[in-house]
Image: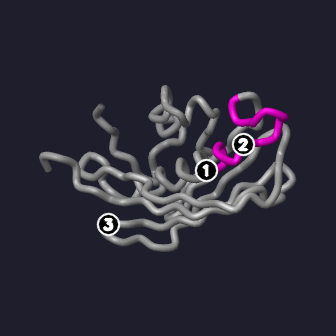
Amino acid sequence: MTFPKLTIDTPLAIINQFAQNSLVDCLGICFTALGEGWVEASMPVDHRTSRPGGYLHGGANLAMAETVAGLGSMLTVDIQEFDVFGIQVSANHTGSATDGMVYARADIVHQGNQTHVWNVEIKNEAGKLISTGRVTNMIVKRNGK
């Protein structure tokens, strides 16, 4: 797949289109805002993201955290020359949700040549912290470049 050049000036509609037919799309994650060193997104709490019993699945939180941090790293490198891989993700789930939307914000805390580290907070519609996480991405030169 040929990746488009992504920057913080890329329209959100193009970024969300880029995520179609992926896990991001399956979970209903939608990028909502971005800037220098940060990315925000929303995700519904529904049958796709809940565990049996109706509560938001912790794994959905982790997928959302890795998604926003991954896009953040992709926006800081030339993705036609480099791949971005999540190599570590961890979180503490501090609350729960059974409906509505949750919102994530990733902020970069380390931007090296080979690794990026992101803090991610996921909150419910009332602004209550649901999960806080850390994501480390590895930046790897694409094969043949």
Tell me the number on the disc at residue 40. none
Q: Is residue 3 above or below residue 113?
A: above
Secondary structure of the residue carrying numbered label 1: helix
**What residue sits 53% from the left and 51% below the top?**
66
Front one among 118 and 36: 118
Residues shaded magenta:
48-61
Residue on which disc 1 sits: 62
Local packing at callout 3 (Cα closer than 10 Å; few below 14, some 14-19, many 20+) is few
Q: Is residue 20 left or right of residue 41?
A: left
Front one among 33 and 26: 26
**What residue sits 79% from the left and 33% below the top?**
52
Measure the alpha-carbon separation of dots 1 and 2.
9 Å
**What residue sits 31% from the left and 49% below the top?**
79
Q: Is residue 57 within the magenta segment?
A: yes
Q: Determine the residue located farthest toward the front in the rendered image.
A: 52
Question: What amino acid is at disc 3?
Answer: Gln
Question: What amino acid is at disc 1?
Answer: Leu
Secondary structure of the residue carrying numbered label 3: loop
Residue on which disc 3 sits: 114
